[in-house]
Image: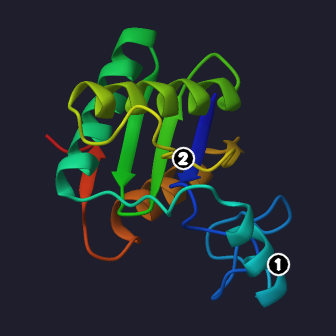
Amino acid sequence: MTYLITFACYGCHLHGDSPGSVDRNHNIPGSRLVEGDTKWVEWARHQMDQPPYSMDEGRRQAVLASVIDRCSNRGWSLLAAHVRTNHVHLLIDAEVRPERVMNDLKSFASRRLNELAFDGSDRKRWARHGSTRWLWKREDVLAALGYVVDKQGEPMAIYDSSEP
């Protein structure tokens, strides 16, 4: 099964944030986002016990390397990845549920960042969940591939299995 998995850095995509957020009803690339809600954002910020997390080039490359390694070790086929400053997009074939894949990759990335001493081990790096979209049709997989690799703005830490 092929999945489009997206997860954000801690505190970077709060529900109600402008220009919009993603939720279970607004999670298809290119679809309308949730409307902004300043009261909700203020409540969410008040709940945070650490500042928002963002990734510089070194952190992005470390996260990308950890994703590639973990997919290889688990026998999952990584089709594409794009590690951005405040979120990660992954296109993966795996024989397990996408939530397990996402949680495993988030944990492994945190472990790699800890090993490289980028942050303290108590640093919150990832939002609690993320988006785990099942892709049933080949055209959906191809559209997701284009979205992950080419539609994110300035290229950052990218993996594309179709590249030589």
Residue that appears at 68% across and 71% down? 45
Q: Which colour scheme is used?
A: rainbow
Residue that appears at 37% across and 46% down? 81
Query: Residue tagged by mark 1?
Result: 40
Between 131 and 47, which is closer to the camera in this rendering? 47
Upstream in sequence: badge 2 or badge 1: 1
Residue 62 is at least partly visible in this image: yes
- Left/right placement of residue 48 relative to residue 146 reads right
Report x, y in % for residue 17: 68, 81
In which quadrant is the C terminus drawn?
top left
Q: Are marks 2 and 1 in contact (CB under 8 Å)?
A: no
Report x, y in % for residue 75: 44, 12
Report x, y in % for residue 83: 35, 53
Question: In the rendered image of this protein, does residue 127 appear above or below residue 110?
Answer: below
Residue 161 is at least partly visible in this image: no
Residue 9 numbered mark, or none: none
Indicate the secondary structure of the residue bearing disc 1: helix
Q: What residue type is labelled 1?
A: Trp
Residue that appears at 66% across and 45% down? 137
Tag 2: Cα neighbours inside 10 Å, few (<14), some, or many (≥20)? many
Between 24 and 108, which is closer to the camera in this rendering? 108
Residue 126 numbered mark, or none: 2
Location of residue 10 (image quadrant): bottom right
Location of residue 134 (image quadrant): top right
Q: What residue type is labelled 2?
A: Trp
Residue farthest along the left direction in this orientation: 164
